[in-house]
Amino acid sequence: MTAYAEHQFDLSLTKIGEGTKRDHLLQVERQTGKRPQELDGPICPHELLYLWSWWSELHQGSPPEGITYTDLLAWGTLYQIHFQSFELSAIMHLDRAFRMFANKEQERRRPKGV
């Protein structure tokens, strides 16, 4: 799932011109009728897709410092979800990976010498 997540982060966070890498590659596909290979990355195992969905929903409202265990507790209570420990670990791992990728991309875009 980590490889899938990192590929999705790359497509969504890497800027090309005014849009994202995903925007750029989809535009190439529309114009040429051929799907760029970069759009098709690792596949998330079917049995773990729910964790990606949970993380995505939690991430939408999370502060810049990321999802906290308190956030998970509140969200789980709201939706009557009783997390297993591996689910909590997976969600926190995805969130850390996202923040690390976002920070690296921000550093890459920062003008040199600033």
Image (spheres, grey):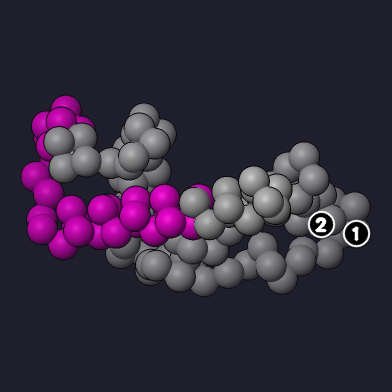
The front one of 91 and 18 is 18
**Circle 1: residue type:** Thr
> Within 10 angstroms of label 2, few (less than 14), some, or many (20 or more) residues?
some
> Badge 1 is on which residue?
32
> Badge 2 is on which residue?
29
Residues in magenta, as a range? 73-102
In this rendering, is residue 80 above or below 87? Answer: above
- Can you tell which quarter of the image residue 32 is in? bottom right
Please provide percent x and percent y for residue 39.
Answer: 67, 63
The front one of 71 and 101 is 101
Q: Magenta: predominant secondary structure element?
A: helix
Q: Residue at x 77, y 64 (%)?
A: 35
Please provide percent x and percent y for residue 65.
Answer: 34, 40
Q: Is residue 5 left or right of residue 68?
A: right
Count of picture labels: 2
In this rendering, is residue 33 above or below 58? Answer: below
Q: Is residue 111 left or right of residue 47?
A: right
Q: Residue at x 49, y 63 (%)?
A: 6
Where disc 1 sits, the SS reads helix
